Image: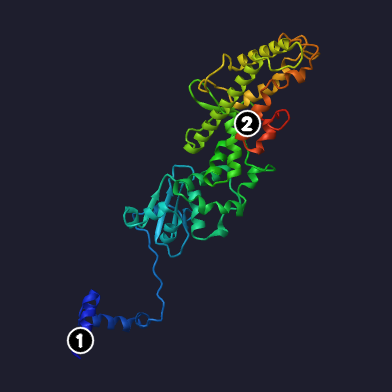
Amino acid sequence: MMAGTIRKRNQGEDNPALNTAPTTDSTSETSRERQCVSNPESATAASDPTIKREPKAKSEGTSSMVTQLSNNGIVTLDDMYDLTLVVGEKERPGGMKAFRVNSVSLRMASPPFKAMLSGRYAESKQSEIPFPDDSPNAFHTVLRVVHLKLHELPESMSKDELLELAAFCDKYLLADLVAPFFTMKNWLGPHKGTGQYLPSNADMQDWAFVAYVFRFKEDYDYLVGELVMCTAVDPDTIDFYYMSDGKKIMLHKDLPVAILERIRVARTTVLQEILAASNTALTSALAMKTCDKQESANCAALRIGILIMAFQELGLYPVLDDTVSIYHSAYSYWKAFVALPNKHKFGPENQYSYRSYSYNTNCNYSKCMGDLGLVQRVRQSLREHTHKGLWPRLGLCKCWPSKSAT
């Protein structure tokens, strides 16, 4: 008996809850008795452990922002919600919506939400959290995924909606969670049309951002490759490019640094190789290594003259040491190089042009001048830095550049 008493006492010391001695409160017992008499069912429920008691959902207080919204502005993702998210502002596009959610599901969705709803932050102690700067539509799409309301996901999304979703997922590290549903719902399909890739039109910077966030590598490489080829720089270092209709589009300064750096680094690399090819072509002409006929000096002089005149027109002569002062796009140089061999050819089509010259009659112009030591080398370089889907459009196959290219 003594040992049993000591063992029980030690167990009570280990658990303070077991240390509390039972007390008799006649007042509380009388109150419970009255409750049982007035409501026998509640008394049975309270005493029967087999009856499941559901937790109650939190309700918003009278000072809640939710009270400002109509029923259409309140979306319940979980009937037993314990947290309300108030997203957007009434005065902003998209307005304001309230989402009643399960905080556990939200914590599992991404590291930022887990940190926000942990004990270290004030938001973790709130039943209502405002997100005034975020898009209600984008938030709603993500919350449907988080709460497994997949049947409620939209069948299609506009370019602006996809852009908002990309910005939201980039901000809260949700891209890996949402990306599979692009394929499941084919959200990009209607925007590609009959093409294989996202369109390289006036919105291609936006599409490049969407592809970057959700890691759609083929689309991303295709669009960034187009921007690498078509981006020019003005003397004030403002990056821009021209559309086929002549419209000038500025490069967005708020693009992720990774995209901007890739465009600028790749553009610099391509231009450096264009400079190297130009210098090599001119050096070869000066060394008279261009013709195996007896009057090779005449052919060399002709070739040197054509190259110097062409390079002057393009701002590449006198020979540049670096790419800092090159303002034109890589594609503009490529078009000029492709057209160069025939631009100065003497023949019926341009025999009256002051820029055309006669050449040694013992030579075949195409064989002697060829591509002036430029086209093939530059083509190979550009193919290494652009997506193969761009080759036909930019004339990087063994064909003339397409007129539809930027």
> In what element is the residue under mark 1?
helix
Q: Is 184 placed left or right of 109 in the picture?
A: right
Task: Quarter of the image for the C terminus: give it.
Answer: top right
Residue at x 58%, y 42% (from the top left corner) = 159
Residue at x 22%, y 83% (from the top left corner) = 7
Q: Nearer the viewer, residue 46 or 296?
A: 296
Label annotation for residue 5 = 1
Q: Is 202 placed left or right of 403 in the picture?
A: left
Q: Is 286 placed left or right of 369 in the picture?
A: left
- Graded by Cα atoms within 10 Å as few (under 14), some (14 to 19) or many (20 or more), the crowding at tag 1 reads few
Give the CA separation, mark 1 to mark 2: 89 Å
- Graded by Cα atoms within 10 Å as few (under 14), some (14 to 19) or many (20 or more), the crowding at tag 2 reads many
Up the image or down, 257 lies above or below 369; here it is below
In the rendered image, the residue lying farthest to the bottom is: 1
Q: Where residue 142 sits: x, y (%)?
A: 50, 53
**Residue type for callout 1:** Thr
Task: Quarter of the image for the N terminus: give it.
Answer: bottom left
Q: Which residue is mark 2?
A: 382
Q: Quadrant of residue 101?
A: bottom left
Labels 1 and 2 touching (C-beta < 8 A): no
Q: Where residue 236 sits: x, y (%)?
A: 48, 22
Task: Looking at the image, tell me whether mark 1 or mark 2 is earlier in sequence order.
Answer: 1
Q: Nearer the viewer, residue 362 or 10?
A: 362
